[in-house]
Amino acid sequence: MHDDDQPPRAQHTWHHLDEEALATLAQRLAAWLRADPGRANLRLTLHGELGAGKTTWTRHLLRALGVQGRIQSPTYALVEPYEVTLGTTAVTVMHADLYRLSDPREWLDAGLAELMDAPGLKLVEWPERAGRLLGTVDVALHLQHDDDHHRHLTWQARTAAGEAALLALRSTP
């Protein structure tokens, strides 16, 4: 059975998020990760139509984690690695955009499975393109437009780690 075949362990939806509110959620997640760098071994998938805000949310999270310089969508490179420091611990963040994959075997052929199995934070846009080969997903983030300037974000915790992150996000003022 694949993670997407099971109901989430916990779920929450934030409604009518503007850009600032989306950034605030990403900052809350970054603060939770900084408090204990061991938490950074998460695999988050980002779901939504083109323009729903997957890359925007990822940029906000990467900025909140301290990434400087240009943050681009890895649509053509497939994966962009970033090194961040959480406390005194160096953590690798892998941002993958699988939009260009047409067959899950391309995930394996490109060597992405090995990259995603290494320690660190994984952020995967268009995860359905890897199919069941993606492996265990801790959090499935679903973004959709509310209107031109607002989105809904649904956090589906699929593991205990994803559930812990959700509890931290919901309990942070």
Image (cartoon, rainbow, N blue to C red):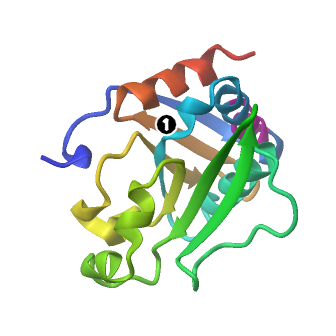
Pointer 1 residue: 155
Q: Position of residue 91 (x, y in %)?
A: 64, 47
Q: Main secondary structure of the magenta part?
A: helix
Q: Nearer the viewer, residue 80 or 85?
A: 85
Which residue is painted at 52% across and 77% down in the image? 78
Q: Position of residue 27 (x, y in %)?
A: 76, 36
Residue 90 lies, with reference to residue 99, above or below; the image says above
Where does the C terminus fall, quadrant-wise?
A: top right
Q: Which residues are magenta?
A: 21-28
> In screen coordinates, is 150 left or right of 127?
right
Residue furthest to the right: 69
Which residue is painted at 12% across and 46% down in the image? 1
Please rate how many residues cluster around mark 1, counting C-alpha atoms within 10 Å: few if below 14, some from 14 to 19, many from 20.
Answer: many
Which residue is painted at 73% across and 29% down in the image? 31
Q: Position of residue 124 (x, y in %)?
A: 49, 60
Decide whether residue 156 is among the magenta residues.
no
Which residue is painted at 66% across and 55% down in the image? 58
Decide whether residue 23 is among the magenta residues.
yes
